[in-house]
Amino acid sequence: MIKPRLIFNEIEQYLDSPEAIIITGMRRTGKTTLLNLIFEKMPSKNKILLDLENPLNRKYFEEENYERIKVSFEMLGIDFSHKPFIFLDEIQFVKYLPSVVKYFIDHYGVKFVLTGSASFYMKNLFTESLAGRKFIFQLFPLTFSEFLLFKESSLKIPSDISGITKANHEAISPLYEEYILYGGFPGVVLKTNVEEKRRALEEIFTSFFQQEVLQLGDFRKNEVIRDLILLLIQRLGSKVDIQKISKELGIGRPTLYNYIAFLEGTFFIKTLKPFTKGKDSEIRKMPKVYICDSGLANHLAKLDSGLLFENSVFQNLRQKGELNYFQKKRGSEIDFILNKEIAYEVKATPHLPDVKKLERVSSELNLRKFQVVSKSYVVHDNIIYGFML
């Protein structure tokens, strides 16, 4: 049985629109599974699904005359006298696919649903050629609420902290701890023991390095970007000092910027820019770095449990909108600011002074709302638990 992702309901609203739907994201987040689910639920029989990782399927798109591609589609069962639906998995394997998609949208009203892993390349390929003809959806590792669905847990998370008793917290905590330690990749969540989870995480990283870094990255020194990955994980939740890192790796700053852009473009990391109010512009160029999944971070490096918790909070917040952080040159800081409106400070075991401090800094920045995110059981109106995000 295919387990649905929450993003399915959002995508479903656009299935009748003329624009192509593109689902992208980190490897092993479930894009192919989601594509198959949409394909199954599509009521039309005038549809095909092709996996472009298969070289035989890529051959259909090698024709310079796109009308010959149309003939191939017809041989596969597509009737162009009625609205056709064409589903393509792993589109990054076909270099000139955007122009093919544009042609069939414009000439035959084809509805495309596409998936691809490497946005670093997809952005370059799709930005101009499909302007006004696409909707892009990013699929991330599971949120904690999705994690509970995949675990088939009967636990319900109250939307208000007043609905969480100490008994509720104790019931949820073991599952939340598992989520923090092993992350939200669907294939990892569905494993039933620790050793299987570790092997799955190892395979996910190996696949990412071989398929994205080695095949698509075309780097002259692959060991340097490997070392950069490990170095950035060690700096999780910290500001990225480009000058210092470039010296450690023995590469120039322009090269380092390109490597970081690649890792971010392929969804492995995410850099957060500072939220500034003028006078603190001196730290504007120093982003903070997080990794796509706390389980992967935990597998690749020995990190403090507080850092893993912070990264897990990041994973859930990033799906709600734009994230920034705030930090004065000396003193006050806020871990996350969501959509320039809501402040979140992450504390495994917060105390009243933490709440007061966040309230003061949030007020200075004219933010609409603030909340301290806790892992421990603490009762306070402005404290929520990480599993509630």
Image (cartoon, helix red, strand yellow):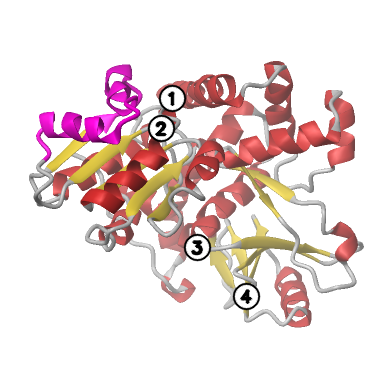
Pointer 4 with pointer 3, Cβ within 8 A: no
Work out how far the residue at label 3 is from the one at label 2, CA to CA, in angstroms: 23 Å
- Residue found 47% across the figure and 21% down from its top: 203
Which residue is more in the foreground, 37 or 67?
A: 67
Q: Please say whether residue 335 is visible from this viewpoint.
A: no
Coordinates of residue 127 in the picture (x, y in percent): 51, 49
| Sequence-first tag of 3 and 1 | 1
- Residue found 23% across the figure and 39% down from its top: 36
Pointer 2 with pointer 4, Cβ within 8 A: no
Residue picked out by circle 4: 341
Residue picked out by circle 3: 320
| Sequence-first tag of 1 and 4 | 1
Residue picked out by circle 2: 188
| Sequence-first tag of 3 and 2 | 2
Task: Single out the mark in the foreground, 3 or 2.
Answer: 3
Q: Which portion, as a residue range, is magenta?
A: 50-78
| Residue 324: mark in rendering | none
Coordinates of residue 300 in the picture (x, y in percent): 62, 27
Pointer 2 with pointer 1, Cβ within 8 A: yes
Q: Please say whether residue 116 is visible from this viewpoint.
A: yes
Pointer 1 with pointer 4, Cβ within 8 A: no
**Residue type highlighted by circle 4:** Glu
- Residue found 41% across the figure and 71% down from its top: 159
Task: Single out the mark in the foreground, 2 or 4.
Answer: 4
Residue picked out by circle 1: 200
Tell me the quarter of the image containing the N terminus. Answer: top left
Q: Does 126 sit above or below residue 145?
A: above
